[in-house]
Image (spheres, helix red, strand yellow):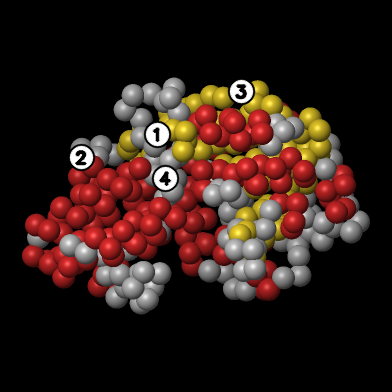
Amino acid sequence: MFDWPVEFERIPDEEWVRQPLDRFGLNYDNVGRHGWYKNLEPTVAQALSALDDDKVLVDYSAGTGLLTKRILANVSYPVGILNVDASPKFLRVAVEHFRDDERVAFRLLSFSKVEKRLRLLDEVVEPALLDRGVDVLTSTNAIHLYGDLTATLESWSRAMRPGGMVFVGSANIRNPNGRPGDWIIDETVAAVNEIAATLVRREPAFERYRDVLDDSGRMAKHTRLREKVFVPVRPLELYLDAFADAGFTVLHVFDETIFARVDEWYQLLGNYHDGVLSWIGGSRRVEGHEPTETAVRDRMFLIRYSLEKLFEAQTSFPCTWTYLTCRR
């Protein structure tokens, strides 16, 4: 049995914990069954090599607990895993999975309206755990989303024990060692937009969406919305420098080619359709209203059509996942 510090509350008494499960969070949880989620396997292996009796792992941007499931399935000794995420919808699903597992705890990176930023790791974890220090930290499929990368990594450093290990993996790092022909997976979204725009201009069935294509101001707003979800890709060197500046030693960088099935990638993009093709039917965050059911159906059709056009006669496509191993 793993024992958390006495003054550490495993499940916080916060409103998001009491909310019902959300369909968006449940849909994302199903992504863990997709073949391209084998990208977690290197991080699972690394984490297991660094864990031992009574060590604490923080899974930062844990989502619905997909990595936690895989780690716990392979340990027979007492460990503690703290799932940290900025999405209450995702984290609520994780609580549902692990509410009765004393090894698993949860913290929400809530948004500070005053400071206009997400709270940092050492701002949501109690001193009782910070004084002990974190032994291992993982971040999978998320580090490319951190706008203030320096502040995030510095907060990791403050929360970790000297010698603690960090294992990071992402398919959205521009890695000069990536294999020719491999995709940076989120760059498929820009390609989907180009193909969809061509079809909208050509086919009378989509004529009602042409006005926005001709409005450069509105399209710029939709592009900015898309880039909040599928953010512009940053180079590997930026991450290496940021880790070094935050007090980490980068021990190893490696990459893997992992194939994503086109139909499974369609399912994920469908969950995020407002971030993929918000200009089809409009968005509350741009025009101030939700898209109609017809517009959502058109979005889903256009996403599927564009992926099939992009990867014609292919059932899957190769992507480069980049992994960083760092020591505090």
Q: CA distance from mark 3 to mark 1?
A: 20 Å
Q: Are marks 3 and 2 in contact (CB under 8 Å)?
A: no
Residue identifier under label 4: 232
Q: Say which label, 2 or 4, has the lower sequence index.
A: 4
Residue appearing at x 83%, y 43% in the figure: 133
Total labels drawn: 4
Which secondary structure, mark 3? strand
Residue appearing at x 49%, y 26% in the figure: 255
Residue 91 screen position, x and y as percent: 62, 60
Residue 252 screen position, x and y as percent: 61, 23
Q: Say which label, 3 or 1, has the lower sequence index.
A: 3
Residue appearing at x 59%, y 31% in the figure: 241
Q: CA distance from mark 2 to mark 4?
A: 25 Å
Q: Nearer the viewer, mark 2 or mark 1?
A: 1
Q: Say which label, 2 or 1, has the lower sequence index.
A: 2
Which secondary structure, mark 4? loop
202 over 233 or under it: above or below = below
The three-letter code of the residue at mark 4 reads Pro
Q: CA distance from mark 2 to mark 1?
A: 16 Å
Q: Nearer the viewer, mark 2 or mark 4?
A: 4
Residue identifier under label 1: 319
Q: Nearer the viewer, mark 3 or mark 2?
A: 3
Q: Dividing the picture into quarters, in which one does residue 283 lie?
A: bottom left
Residue appearing at x 33%, y 24% in the figure: 180
Q: Nearer the viewer, mark 3 or mark 1?
A: 3
Which secondary structure, mark 1? strand
Q: Nearer the viewer, residue 33 or 257?
A: 257
Q: Which mark is residue 234?
A: none
Q: Nearer the viewer, residue 168 or 17?
A: 168
Residue identifier under label 2: 312
The three-letter code of the residue at mark 3 reads His
